[in-house]
Amino acid sequence: MTISAEVAAVHGSGDGEGGGHPPAVPQSQSPLPGVLGSRGRLRPAPRRLRTVLRTLAGTVGSRGLRGWLVSRRRSEELEEVKDHHSLYPEIGRKSSMDVDGSEQDPEMKEYSSVYVGREEDIKKSERMTAVVHDREVVIFYHKGEYHAMDIRCYHSGGPLHLGDIEDFDGRPCIVCPWHKYKITLATGEGLYQSINPRDPSAKPKWCSKGVKQRIHTVTVDNGNIYVTLSNEPFKCDSDFYATGKFKVIRSSF
């Protein structure tokens, strides 16, 4: 009889009444005291097996031998998985892509500057669009300064290159043509007006939602305009619309 058969015989699978089931071990005896002999009688187990069974009985407690074996098997499977990942660390590594196909963590990349056009052209139109490292951006020329940001509004993906530039609270902003969201050109903050509901006579004041639109760097060299994508270590709301299926604007002004 094998060890597993002996363990099954000792542990028992029935109530000891009929059906060919082995008799239950009396409660007065110590747990797993012996094994069944060839005639169905309990006989002392070999010393080595007796030691193993007593050790198991002391380990499993009230959970029983079966529960201990299941737990042991799960532990072995977990160890196998850990060993496999240690040999193949690339398996199971978190992807840098979001579920919608947009890339995560822009700070993990180092972007080079990309030529987008000539200075005289943007000064005439005061804005232009470009695709920089597969990311769509809009470049504004406003009051002698260049500004670049993601082309689609952080709120709902509206085309910012079709919006108007207006000053709010002394700060130049691009106004999204879809829902009139106001975004500062210099910092990408979303602006809104608020009022104290406890003081209806108070005047509304401009407040900031924080940086919502990703801002990129514009440089001019010998009349050529270059854009370097931002690698700031934070997630902007506009990142959602900057890649994937929302990337539809391709041509420049």
Image (cartoon, rainbow, N blue to C red):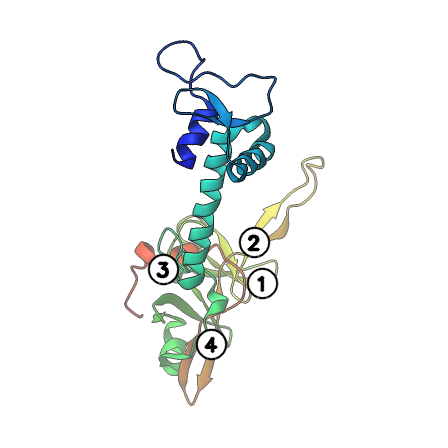
- Label disc, if present, on residue 191 of the rendered structure: 2
Q: Residues within 10 Å of mark 3 (few under 14, many from 20)?
A: some
Q: Is residue 239 above or below residue 216?
A: above
Q: Residue at x 49, y 40 (%)?
A: 72
Q: Is residue 23 above or below residue 72?
A: above
Q: Position of residue 240 (x, y in %)?
A: 42, 54
Q: Is residue 62 above or below residue 160?
A: above
Residue designated by label 4: 218
Left/right of residue 201 with respect to residue 42 in the rendered view: right
Q: Nearer the viewer, residue 148 or 59?
A: 59
- Label disc, if present, on residue 171 of the rendered structure: 1
- Label disc, if present, on residue 243 of the rendered structure: 3
Q: Tell me whether circle 2 and circle 3 mark residues in contact (CB < 8 Å).
A: no
Real-space Cα separation, disc 4 to disc 1, in angstroms: 19 Å
Give the foreground label among 2 and 1.
2
Q: Tell me whether circle 2 and circle 1 mark residues in contact (CB < 8 Å).
A: yes
